[in-house]
Amino acid sequence: MKNFFTIIGGMGTEATETFIHILNERTHAESDQEYLNYILVNHSTIPDRTDYILDHSKPNPLIPLAEDIKQQSALHPDFFAIPCNTAHYFYNDLQELTDIPILHMPKETVKAIKDYAPNAKKVGLIATKGTLHDKIYDKEIIDAGYELVKPTNKIADQTMTLIYDDIKAKNYVDESLYHLILSQMVEGLKCDIVILGCTELSVAQQRACNHDYPVIDAQTVLADKCIDLAEANRSQNK
């Protein structure tokens, strides 16, 4: 197969399924042949990223992630996409293992804010406690000239409940809880836009999008970037 990219997924599987749905849905295709070429690695047994980031005595996700990058690099994809925000804690280590570019979801998301909310000044972030702790979004948001607004401890706990207890454990989206989290970020903390910085939050947005809160979904941004790059590569190699 030529002109393809590799998706390192499985973190978690439902979130990866949502990413693939977004990717295919947003691809401009009128026939089977107009969809994108990609390999999906659904590596569901990768240890939990947040567990490791908060406690380095826990199993290290970098080890299987590195194996995936090495194995897939041998197939020479055009680029890699990792639809897991927290896994970007290991981004530099993974990029050092290959000459093939790995898209950086947090960077691409922050760059896209100007398209979603041109007048935004205060950017909120909801994510796993691992992502909040490792600050993978912080520098990108601040360097772009925005004011970073992190959730309160209460909102962070609610977000972890939504991600782990509901979506990961039960494949269930508590719509009222999701909307409550957004209302607290927008109405309470006065965010102009809120980054959905966890792929399980992308699942929540897909299933409970009947709200008017200004959000930017990192998974959707990553999907759009994959489409742009893949279509450009295909055009260059016709």
Image (tube, grey):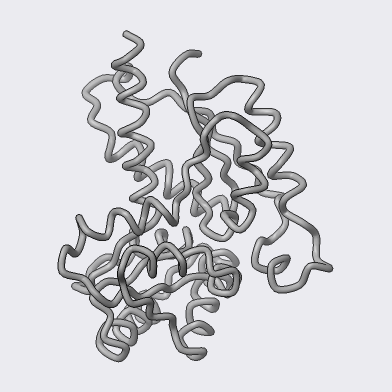
Q: Residue furthest left?
A: 119
Task: Give the percent coordinates (x, y) of residue 74.
Answer: 66, 21
Residue under the image location 60 percent in, 36 percent down:
41
Q: Quadrant of residue 209?
A: bottom left
| Residue 118 vertical placement versus 228 (above, below) | below
| Residue 20 vertical placement versus 107 (above, below) | above
- Image label count: 0
Residue under the image location 33 percent in, 77 percent down:
147
Residue under the image location 46 percent in, 69 percent down:
138
Task: Give the percent coordinates (x, y) of residue 171.
Answer: 51, 62
Q: Residue furthest top?
A: 238
Left or right: 26 in relation to 53: left
Left or right: 221 in relation to 197: left
Residue under the image location 53 percent in, 54 percent down:
84
Task: Give the percent coordinates (x, y) of residue 117.
Answer: 19, 64
Residue 190 visible, this angle:
yes
Q: Quadrant of residue 225?
A: top left
Q: Residue furthest right?
A: 57
Q: Quadrant of the C terminus?
A: top left
Residue 204 visible, this angle:
no
Task: Give the percent coordinates (x, y) of residue 214.
Answer: 23, 70
| Residue 86 vertical placement versus 223 (above, below) | below
Q: Quadrant of residue 34?
A: top left
